[in-house]
């Protein structure tokens, strides 16, 4: 079977589908949404995360780094990300766990072995396995990895959830649909041009896959990252309503933008996204727009 | 159950409901803020009675002491409609010096802590304590225990305790499990006295029956004292009513007087009488020996018929029942104890007044009641530390009932803790199958939670026979130092060889087993004599009346008189020991990353200057992560501990004794006495809590991995207990889904064979501490929004938001 890049396997995951679940996070995503709360998931290669607030200034990383990317300044370790080759030598020796590597190659069998450990928990809670990312249909390596993972999980009788943005070749998506019970399907913007401007990718294939999902036997939950002034306009919401009502879909799970992922941008040495959060009143106004177009919103 | 002679009155009670909330608030506020005081009354009685009755049998002297306290202590009313307090002072504490007086000499100037905070010792009490010390220093349970050990084995056992190899069990008074409360509620003490008188009259005057005569005589004295005690309250209420001008308050007082005239002497006729009868009985047991582990048992089941009848006849509403229960909760919390500083460290003032809910009835049906749901509601409202609630979990529990359980757990108090009903029943049957009279299925099903996590038979069982509580982690030190204790510098264990010369892990493990066997042997010899010392100095009289079998057999509880006596060998820090062995196996023998010499050097230096070795120690695989080879070692380790314990031979009752693997706060006490461990734990730091919990910060695979590892670590049928604390953030349990997931976790834990589990919802205080000291909370995981995160790695503003949210989540 195939292999791919995984950056986290979260057991006892409770927000990514029904019951108690294990969520497998695949690394790599074709989109570059500026609000991304898991920025370490975007690139399909291992990356160093450095949490400066946990550093004790022991200097072990300075000794370990072959690329002179770390140094001690004012008693704390400083990271020069431009020199870092993401080799992981510093994370190996850091006693304070201030440095960790995100992403490692895993075999399908390896992943499944971990997923199957909690089978009894899934059975007792109505849970299962969720594949997320990154974009699981594209991330993790080539498309075989996710197809094999989904098929093998389904073969074990597990409830399978796919947390996807839909940016996936159509034939692969059709293959996946056969073995998926629930899709948590992101809808970021209806307008192709706007979608491209924001995420770097056109939404044509995404909407095709969305239509395929909505007409398949799988359960589909639409999820929308709601970003002030980016995708909350009345026009966009009207377009969404037109699209989803065709398929008898009237409920959207919204995820209002939050700044909880900022620390990870620091840890990757990247600048923070230039976004702001909603005030409670603003959010009420935006949710009301959905209601006016006949769409219920629930907070994901 | 037979038809109860219920009250015919159909009107409500005279409780002044207009003022109950205010009175509850006042009592609660006083409890939380008032200083604890060590009351001199009991010391005075002790001095008088032992002088007055010198030469009488010990049973009789003990009964007279009990009577003297109940009849002469100052009594008062404090606005609680349930009357009866332990001491003559509000929130007072009594000294119980008959077990141990060394703290009087050693610690008089030090701060004294109970479960309610610091305790003050007034001058009069101090003077009496000093006098008591002089009289008792060579007569206490522990003094005789140690003397008798020296007489028999020629060794002074004190260094074993001092080194932290074990805790001397008889150095403190202890509770003994679950008394037969329904006996008093349904028959009344008068009927019990009549029965005792008949037995005394019928007892043949054979020389062999001398003890029986003494016991029955004394039991009658003790029961009469409990009745007279309630009558004192009746008189006080009547007298107070005379000068009370508010008609509602007056009516309540007169009703209290009427109730106190009736119970516990005669059967309770309604819930109001039953709650007072229960309290007088419980208070009397606690007065005789105020200590940890006197548990009310299946309160919500034996009180249910009274509750049902009152509710059905409109005498009480459910809301009023909860209000009364809140007053009872206050009563339980007012019972505090103090037995010296080390006791405060080992038990944190815990009093173990555990109520068991759920479980099966004698026929194997769901025994849970609607009243139990009100107990849960009371706990949600009070969020108290006593009584504690324990659910005997089984598949027949109703969904609505389980939802109430979940509501209580996520209320933040961590209650109820859960016990696996199947494991407990099987354990109870396995334990008593080897006894001469065996056990009936009905009695096994009537199991309950004794004290913290131990189990036994309600009303018929006792675990007063303790063993010294060994520290399994300390054995690691003994191995590393070839049997020579680094604290006392004495050769307290056998010479198992210099570990630097061990070539294989098996050699190391054999040395561990040899050291453990030596400790268990010493501890058993010492414990067996401690049982004799306890029986000699402080045999319980009233409590013996209250635990079935003692009256029937004419033998007190301490001599094994009740129907299902069991030994309670608590043992602590098994996970620290197993993890230490695993780390050494991994680093020294398997991976050969360091040598034994390097490890010992680093441990001696408390890892100062050995950060790299410490990191290796901390990173080495440990229990709690569902790694098959690690967990199978932990399971084998616990099996070996059990086998070694059994290889010493039968206990003082002649049976195999299942080990009670739990910690109380011994992990804290022993931790303070120990040096650094191969697990990476530094000297003086608390050891791992529970017996199957993960070492703090060493579980990385999430709660399902932890739960599976914890469930399987110990054979919970063969052992007397396991003990498992799991931390949880309240918001992880939010909503219907959170409730379902929590139930699924409990169900799965039980299906994997776990026995005890308690969910600690992480408080906002902990989160605040994590924010202030991030390096101490490296592994605290929080679900933020769409992803999980290590709390310490979140931005301060986000942390603040979560801290705030947690406060609302309750």
Image: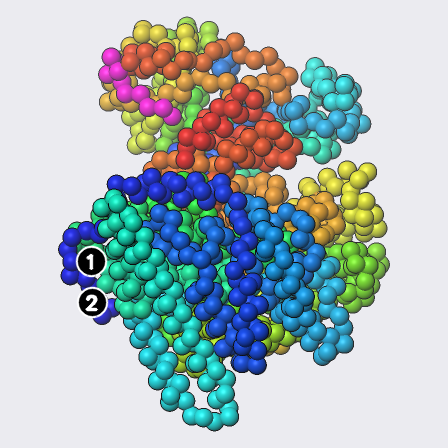
Left or right: residue B297 versus residue B431 is left
- The residue at the point 46 percent across, 31 percent down is B806
- The residue at the point 84 percent across, 50 percent down is B597
Residue B613 found in image quarter: top right
**Which residue is denoted by mark 2 in the rendering?**
B5
Which labelled disc corresponds to residue B309? 1
In this view, A195 is above or below B76: above
Residue that lies at the very extreme toward the front in this rendered image:
B243
Considering the numbered disc 2 on the image, is that residue within a helix, a strand or a loop?
Answer: loop
Give x and y (percent) for residue A202. Answer: 43, 11
**Residue A297 part of the magenta-drawn span:** yes
In this view, A46 is above or below B363: above
Q: Give the range drawn in magenta.
A: A291-300
In this view, A237 is above or below B515: above
Left or right: residue B161 versus residue B64 is right
In this view, B780 is above or below B642: above
- The residue at the point 61 percent across, 35 percent down is B777
């Amino acid at each position: 079977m195939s292999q791919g890049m995984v950056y986290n396997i979260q057991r006892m995951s409770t927000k990514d589908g029904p019951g108690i679940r294990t969520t497998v996070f695949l690394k790599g995503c074709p989109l570059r949404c500026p609000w991304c709360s898991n920025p370490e998931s975007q690139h399909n290669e291992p990356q160093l995360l450095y949490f400066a607030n946990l550093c004790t200034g022991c200097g072990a990383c300075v000794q370990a780094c072959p690329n002179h990317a770390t140094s001690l300044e004012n008693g704390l370790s400083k990271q020069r990300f431009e020199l870092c080759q993401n080799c992981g030598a510093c994370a190996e020796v850091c006693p304070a766990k201030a440095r960790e590597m995100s992403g490692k190659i895993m075999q399908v069998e390896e992943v499944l072995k971990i997923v199957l450990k909690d089978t009894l928990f899934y059975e007792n809670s109505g849970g299962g396995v969720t594949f997320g990312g990154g974009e699981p249909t594209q991330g993790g390596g080539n498309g075989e990895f996710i197809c094999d993972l989904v098929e093998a999980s389904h073969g074990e009788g597990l409830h399978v959830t796919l947390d996807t943005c839909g940016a996936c070749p159509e034939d692969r998506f059709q293959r996946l649909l056969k073995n998926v019970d629930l899709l948590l399907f992101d809808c970021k913007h209806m307008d192709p041009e706007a979608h491209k401007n924001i995420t770097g990718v056109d939404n044509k294939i995404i909407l095709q896959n969305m239509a395929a999902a909505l007409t398949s036997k799988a359960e589909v939950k639409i999820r929308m990252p709601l970003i002030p002034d980016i995708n909350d306009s009345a026009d966009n919401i009207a377009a969404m309503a037109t699209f989803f009502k065709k398929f008898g879909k009237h409920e959207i799970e919204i995820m209002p933008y939050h700044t909880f992922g900022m620390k990870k941008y620091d840890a990757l040495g990247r600048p923070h996204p230039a976004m702001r959060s909603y005030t409670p009143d603003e959010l009420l106004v935006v949710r009301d727009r959905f209601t006016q177009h006949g769409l219920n919103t629930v907070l994901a | 159950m037979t038809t109860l002679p219920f009250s015919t009155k159909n009107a409500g009670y005279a409780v002044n409901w207009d003022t109950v909330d205010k009175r509850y608030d006042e009592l609660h506020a006083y409890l939380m803020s008032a200083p604890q005081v060590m009351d001199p009354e009991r010391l005075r009685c002790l001095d008088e009675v032992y002088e007055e009755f010198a030469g009488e049998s010990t049973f009789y002297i003990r009964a007279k002491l009990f009577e003297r306290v109940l009849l002469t202590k100052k009594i008062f009313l404090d606005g609680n409609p349930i009357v009866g307090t332990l001491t003559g002072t509000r929130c007072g504490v009594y000294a119980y010096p008959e077990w141990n007086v060394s703290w009087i000499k050693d610690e008089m100037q030090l701060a004294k802590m109970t479960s309610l905070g610091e305790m003050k010792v007034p001058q009069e009490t101090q003077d009496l304590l000093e006098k008591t010390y002089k009289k008792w220093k060579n007569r206490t349970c522990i003094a005789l225990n140690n003397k008798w050990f020296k007489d028999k084995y020629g060794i002074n056992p004190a260094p074993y305790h001092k080194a932290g190899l074990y805790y001397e069990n008889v150095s403190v008074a202890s509770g003994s499990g679950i008394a037969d409360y329904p006996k008093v509620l349904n028959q009344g003490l008068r009927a019990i006295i009549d029965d005792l008188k008949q037995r005394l009259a019928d007892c043949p005057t054979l020389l062999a029956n001398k003890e029986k005569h003494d016991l029955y005589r004394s039991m009658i004295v003790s029961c009469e004292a409990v009745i007279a005690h309630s009558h004192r309250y009746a008189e006080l209420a009547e007298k107070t009513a005379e000068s009370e001008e508010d008609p509602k308050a007056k009516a309540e007082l007169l009703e209290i007087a009427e109730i106190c005239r009736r119970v516990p002497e005669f059967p309770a006729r309604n819930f109001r009488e039953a709650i007072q009868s229960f309290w007088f009985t419980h208070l009397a047991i606690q007065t005789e020996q105020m200590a940890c582990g006197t548990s009310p048992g299946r309160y919500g089941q034996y009180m249910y018929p009274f509750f049902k009848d009152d509710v059905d006849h409109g005498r009480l509403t459910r809301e009023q029942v909860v209000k009364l229960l809140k007053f009872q909760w206050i009563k339980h919390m007012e019972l505090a104890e103090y037995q010296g500083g080390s006791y405060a460290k080992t038990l944190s003032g815990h009093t173990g007044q555990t109520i068991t809910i759920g479980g099966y009835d004698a026929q194997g049906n769901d025994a849970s009641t609607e009243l139990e749901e009100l107990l849960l509601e009371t706990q949600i409202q009070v969020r108290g530390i006593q009584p504690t609630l324990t659910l005997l979990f089984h598949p027949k529990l109703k969904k609505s009932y389980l939802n109430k359980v979940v509501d209580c757990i996520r209320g933040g108090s961590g209650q109820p803790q859960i016990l696996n009903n199947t494991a407990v029943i099987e354990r109870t049957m396995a334990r008593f199958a080897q006894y001469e009279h065996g056990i009936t299925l009905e009695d096994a099903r009537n199991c309950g939670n004794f004290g913290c996590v131990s189990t036994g038979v309600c009303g018929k069982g006792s675990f007063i026979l303790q063993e010294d509580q060994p520290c399994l982690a300390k054995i690691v030190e003994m191995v590393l130092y070839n049997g020579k204790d680094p604290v006392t510098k004495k050769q307290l264990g056998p010479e198992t060889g210099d570990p630097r010369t061990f070539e294989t892990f098996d050699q190391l493990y054999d040395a561990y087993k040899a050291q453990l066997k030596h400790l268990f042997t010493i501890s058993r010899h010492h414990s067996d004599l401690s049982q004799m010392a306890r029986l000699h100095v402080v045999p319980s009289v009233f409590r013996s009346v209250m635990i079935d079998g003692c009256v029937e057999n004419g033998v007190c509880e301490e001599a094994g008189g009740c129907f299902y006596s069991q030994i309670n060998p608590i043992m602590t820090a098994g996970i620290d020991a197993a993890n230490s062995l695993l780390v050494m196996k991994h680093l020294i023998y398997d991976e050969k990353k360091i040598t034994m010499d390097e490890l010992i050097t680093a441990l001696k230096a408390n890892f100062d200057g050995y950060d790299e070795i410490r990191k290796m120690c901390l990173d080495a695989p440990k229990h709690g992560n569902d790694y098959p080879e690690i967990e199978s070692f932990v399971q084998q380790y616990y099996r070996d501990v059990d086998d070694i314990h059994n290889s010493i031979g039968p206990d003082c009752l002649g049976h195999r004794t299942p080990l009670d693997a739990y910690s109380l706060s011994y992990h804290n006490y022993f931790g303070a006495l120990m040096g650094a461990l191969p697990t990476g734990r530094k000297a003086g730091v608390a050891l791992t809590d529970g017996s199957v919990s993960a070492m703090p910060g060493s579980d990385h695979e999430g709660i399902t991995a932890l739960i599976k590892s914890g469930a399987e670590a110990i054979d919970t049928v063969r052992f007397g207990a396991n003990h498992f604390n799991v931390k949880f953030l309240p918001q992880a349990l939010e909503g219907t889904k959170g409730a379902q997931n929590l139930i699924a976790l409990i169900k799965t834990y039980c299906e994997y064979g776990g026995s005890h589990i308690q969910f600690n919802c992480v408080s906002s205080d902990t989160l605040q501490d994590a924010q202030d000291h991030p390096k101490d909370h490296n592994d605290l995981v929080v679900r933020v929004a769409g992803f999980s995160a290590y709390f310490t790695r979140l931005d301060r503003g986000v942390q603040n938001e979560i801290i705030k949210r947690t406060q609302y989540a309750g």
